[in-house]
Image (spheres, grey):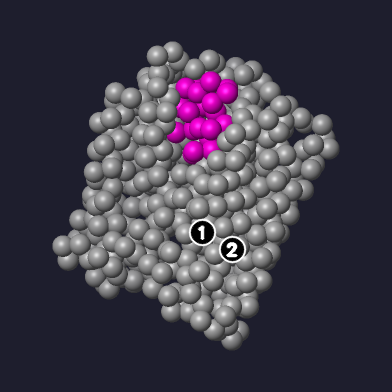
Amino acid sequence: MPHPASPPKGVNPWAATVLLLMGNFMNLIDVSIVNVALPSIRTDLGASETQIEWISAAYVLAFAVGLLPCGRFGDKLGRKRLFLSGVGLFTLASVLCGLAPDINVLIGARALQGIGGAMMVPQVMAIMHVIFPPEQKAKAFALAGVVISLGAVTGPLLGGVLISGNLYGLEWRPIFLVNLPVGLLVVLAGFWLIPRLESSRDMAIDWWGVGLFGLAITLVVLPMIEGPLLGWPWWTLVTLVAAIPVGALFLRRQHALEAEGREQLLPMVLLRDRGFLSGVTVVMLHFSAIPGMFLVLAIYFQTGFGLTPLESGIATAPFPLGIMLGSYVTGRFGTRALVGRVALGAAVMLAGMIWLRHAAGHPPADLGPATLAGPLAMNGLGMGLAISPLFQLVLRDVPGRIAGAATGGMQAFQQIGAAIGIAIVSSLFFVRLRVDQDHAAAIGHALSYQICVFAAILTVLALRQWRGDRRAVTP
């Protein structure tokens, strides 16, 4: 696969990256910040359990379905244009969420937020992939890894602060309205600081492929959202099985388009590249472990041991601190030993998950915010070590012309992994919790999944090396 084009001249890539990551951070924290506010939203708007569930589900589903198509739209229409349009739509939808008069408007605005997020997120990595020279990409992706990881844990903490403060008597609404000044800043400054990159305006969009891909993602993600809460009724299993032929039809169409010399929604050249495929597999596995872990930890801290939402957020603070340290260390290695660094991060997280499972499964009587600081910091360190080289592994040989498709595809599978992980981990947790309401035993049962995931990642990386695919190890 050819290497990406040289970065454009006269561009300050770090100034552009700050704005790109600010937009991405808005999207990331919005996924988790809402969970803290759900009890307040339910009381204020008189929502049913199903409606409360769809506040999150509408966002996740719209976001996952839109990632790959919007990545491709960025390749055609211009990544800067689509990023800024996505930030603008996300900001507008956030205001609609904050002003929603009833639950139905809120759910619709959350779906609109998901579409805005899908428009902007694939452009972030695609633009960074092009504007940085090779010697600076490691530090740039390390910074992106910090932002992505911080987003997973900052949401509950920020949500706890905003809801506890009850600003101007608005209760839960500031968790959405806070996006307005940030979004406006990103859009206005982005016009000046984010470079306008070359686009492929002559590229045709595969609308049949967009429909098939969206249907396949929906058939996977929807039952993963609904299944754990509904006890896995028959239709969820049928839906998952139906995703297989729909996915096969999508791939068959992409092969046919390639044979005809036409543009594909998911370029087949990516699916023939073992480095890209093994990297995407590791991304999907890795991000299936983290959201589920924080979901059950929030229940463990608050329901099991009576911590407040703010205390629960503080309890997870060692994780981002570990990420910062790991990202600083790994960023100094540039493009060297990428597979080895990902493997080191996965090994550290494997050990950290074993430690966390033991510590959380045998808690002291006076459990507080600092009780699990050690294992959470170790897991953060492992994630910080792994994220930057992992993104480089996936994207380093991708030509700039299809960078949007590559990043959109990678992040679509990242979302699939997150949905699968949350479904599995929450099912393991609640199945064990129903036995005797023992939160310590339940979280030990749930965290077995994370241990298996990081063992699987090490296996995938070992197989990659054994097969002789060493192109991503050194430049």
Residue 177 lies left or right of residue 139; in this view the side is: left
State the predominant SS element of the stretch in magenta.
helix
Examine the rendered structure and indicate whether residue 463 appears above or below residue 268: below
Tags 1 and 2 touching, CB below 8 Å: yes
- Percent position (x, y) of residue 207? 46, 31
Q: Amino acid type of disc 1?
A: Pro
- Percent position (x, y) of residue 105? 26, 57
Q: Amino acid type of disc 2?
A: Gly
Examine the rendered structure and indicate whether residue 282 appears above or below residue 256: below
Q: Is residue 409 visible?
A: no
**Point 66% across, 65% down: residue:** 355
Real-space Cα separation, disc 1 to disc 2, in angstroms: 8 Å
Examine the rendered structure and indicate whether residue 203 appears above or below residue 114: above
Q: Is residue 14 visible?
A: yes
Part of the protein shown in magenta: 124-144
**Residue in the foreground of this view, choosing between 153 and 110:** 153
**Point 68% across, 23% down: residue:** 475
Per the image, is 141 magenta? yes
Residue 401 lies left or right of residue 309; in this view the side is: right
Per the image, is 292 magenta? no
Q: Which element carries disc 2, helix, strand or loop? A: helix
Q: Pointer 2: what residue?
A: 374
Q: Which element carries disc 1, helix, strand or loop? A: helix
Q: Pointer 1: what residue?
A: 318
**Point 65% across, 59% down: residue:** 352
Residue 119 lies left or right of residue 270; in this view the side is: left
Q: Mark 1 or mark 2, which has the lower sequence index?
A: 1
